[in-house]
Amino acid sequence: MNNIAIYLRISVLEKGNPRHAEDTINSQRNIIKNFIFNDPDLKKANIEEFIDEGYSGSTTSRPGLDKLLLKVRQQKIDCIIVKDMSRFMRNYIEMGDYLENIFPFMGVRFIAINDGYDSSKETQNGTELDIQFKNLLNDYYSRDISEKMTTALYTARKQGKYTTGTPPYGYLKDPKDKYKLIIDEAVSDNVRYIFQLILEGHTLNGTAKILNDEGVITARARRKEIKGYDAYANRWESTVEETIWSASMVRRIVKNEAYTGTFVFNKSTKSKLDGGKVIYHPKEDWIRIYDNHEALISKETFDEVGKALKSRHRNSFRGSKSKYKNSPLATFVRCNKCGYKIRFGKSSNGKELIGINLYCYHCRMLEQEEKLPHYKELEKEVFEILKDKFHIDKAEKKKLLDEQKELYDKNDQLLKKKRIEFENYKFGKISREDFVEIKDLLQESSEENNKRIEAIDKEFKESGSIETLTEDVVGKYIKTIYISSKGIERIEYQ
């Protein structure tokens, strides 16, 4: 036993809640380290911590968990220790998959202290039935908590409480009431200035350029100024600090009804389960509470700006019958100099779309822009590169796809059967021995199907059929394209 990973997690509800003192990060750490210290084999190993604070156990999209599983795939972890199963994962199907298939396959020992579980001492392919039942209860508990949280948030918002994390630029949370917005006097005039510039006839890009020329502080820079650190620095990788105004930043401000004193919610709902999928609601379902906080601009000014922007957009392409499409490369190209995303800006002659201009907004704002290649040349070069690297016969591709779909369908049926048999066992309809025998047979069939699915995936990854350049085709093979005035500098493949 060389490398041990200890995983620590608390949810949003548990964070700072005295009722959950036993589940704090420190308490979990102490329990696990005490367990390791009292085991003669474990205490000799190297220990690495992976932590997620404020994340639900029902979602697998967690930074700490992602880093841990990456090291597992890289075979740098020999053992994982958690306080209990629910710290690691609440979804009983996925938890079972890790215990029965993934960890045994990777040779990783898994220990859940409070559950008395140690995979090195278990039979039944890595998980006993009482552990499966605990995972099932954890799953049901997570769904119940999710529904209660959603109801509580909706009730608070109906009362006009601002429950969103970060206030809009120009506002602060009231120190006396964290659910109330107050004006940020340091930058509130900047918001009024932005609306004024649009009313004076400036475009979104033109307004951003003026703000940059005058050194007006951005929302992210203002947040850093208030907090003393960049609250977003560790949430995503970015090669450019967002201290430069862009058209999209200006657009977000002039379209935000909060500046009229209106609190708008129910725009979308985010499931706490199923990976946090966001469901967007139509505008007629949005809920508005007027005069909820002090306004920075009048409703009349807000409406005038909206009409002005809509009119300019409509007049730019009036009478256009063009079938001009965005480039399939638009979401994949970055500047080789600064790493910022390349903009594919449509150009027109006042009547119709005539092309796409490529430019780096960041370098442009810093007045360091170089002339980038024409988008058609870029598309042609990428198409030729992909044709040279990947090819597969159409008939063979269809045959493989049909086979793979059939295997996925079979696995779905096996999973449904497995769930049914587990329910039958839980309610005493079949014996433990019968369930174990059925489960093993179903698992064996599923593993055979997965092996063939992986083999087909490998064939597709190593080859493909490319007739035309589309966004789907590019996304299948390419992660990022870095360009300069010389053309393509390098390509990162999937």
Image (cartoon, rainbow, N blue to C red):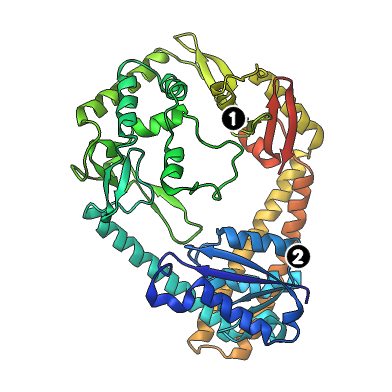
The residue wearing badge 2 is 76
Q: Residue at x 55, y 25 (%)?
A: 361
Q: What residue do we see at 56% from left, 47% from top?
A: 236
Res 258 quadrant in image: top left
Q: Nearer the viewer, residue 250 or 16?
A: 16
Q: Nearer the viewer, residue 346 or 62?
A: 62
Location of residue 214 by image quarter = top left
State if disc 2 and disc 1 touch (CB < 8 Å).
no
Indicate which disc, 1 or 2, sits on the residue closer to the N terminus. 2
**Neighbourhood count class around disc 2 (C-alpha, 10 Å): few under 14, some 14–19, many 20 upward:** some
Question: With respect to residue 105, does 353 lie above or below?
Answer: above
Q: Can I make out residue 416 in this image?
A: no
Q: Label 2 sits on what residue type?
A: Lys
Q: What's under tag 1, amino acid-wise?
A: Ala
In percent of width and height, residue 173 lies at: 31, 49
* Helix, strand or loop for disc 2: loop
Q: Quadrant of residue 445?
A: bottom right
Residue identified by numbered label 1: 330
Q: Position of residue 190 (x, y in %)?
A: 34, 29
